[in-house]
Each structure stands twice: as structure tokens, then as C-alpha cells.
Amino acid sequence: MTMKPSQKEEEYFIKLEFEKKKKLEAEKNKRIMEEEKKRLRDLHHMRCPKCGMTLVEIDHMSVKVDRCASCDGIWLDAKELETIIQLNQPNLKRWLKLF
Ligand SMILES: [Zn+2]
């Protein structure tokens, strides 16, 4: 009888070790992705998606509109377009006059 583990056992431990390292790598990548997401969010927050300049928030008739101070582009948050559509005709005209 030999003390050396059999080939199969050795393979099993190599595989186990690999799975452990693979899991650690995946966790590391996830952390890097989260850091990158945070970095991009900080970098792009309230920036125009077209020209990259600062967006100015305008709060009008319960709709918050972000307007670019440079190219005059208008950015709406989720559901804000639906809110604008729901405004009745005279209100909508008044609202649109602003822009
Ligand atoms: Zn812009």
C-alpha cells in the first residue's frame, strides 16, 4: 500500500483547486465590474449623452426634464414621457413652449 494519493484523487484535488480559483476570479471580476460601473456613473451623471456637457434640471408641471446647457438636447427620465403625454392639450402646449 502506498501513501501517495491515486491518480484519480490527485485529479479531483486539482479540479477542486481550479474551481476554487475560478470562483475567486469571478468574484474579483464582479468587483471590478461594479467599480467600473460606479466610475462610469460618476463620470456621466448629469452629463449630456450627445456632447458630454452638463445637464440642467428643469422641474415643470411635475415633470423633471434635464436639458443640456450646451446643445439644448432634452433628456427625460423613465416614465416622464408618459407623464407628458398624459397632460391635456392646452397644458401640453404650454409645456412645449418652454422648450
Ligand atoms: Zn449636449
Image (cartoon, grey):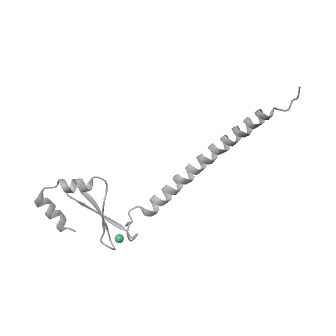
- Please tell me how many numbered marks the rendered image carries: 0
- Ligand 1 - quadrant of the structure image: bottom left
Query: Residue 84 sits in which quadrant?
Result: bottom left
Tell me where residue 88 appears, x and y as whole percent.
13, 56
Q: Furthest residue to the left?
A: 90
Q: Is residue 66 above or below residue 72?
A: above
Q: Is residue 90 left or right of residue 25?
A: left
Q: Residue at x 49, y 56 (%)?
A: 37
Query: Residue 76 sits in which quadrant?
Result: bottom left
Image quadrant where one finds the N terminus: top right
Q: Furthest residue to the top?
A: 1
Q: Residue at x 52, y 52 (%)?
A: 34
Q: Is residue 97 left or right of residue 27?
A: left
Q: Nearer the viewer, residue 6 or 17?
A: 6
Q: Residue at x 62, y 43 (%)?
A: 23
Q: Is residue 71 above or below residue 21?
A: below
Image quadrant where one finds the C terminus: bottom left
Q: Furthest residue to the bottom?
A: 70
Tell me where residue 38 appears, x and y as whole percent.
49, 56
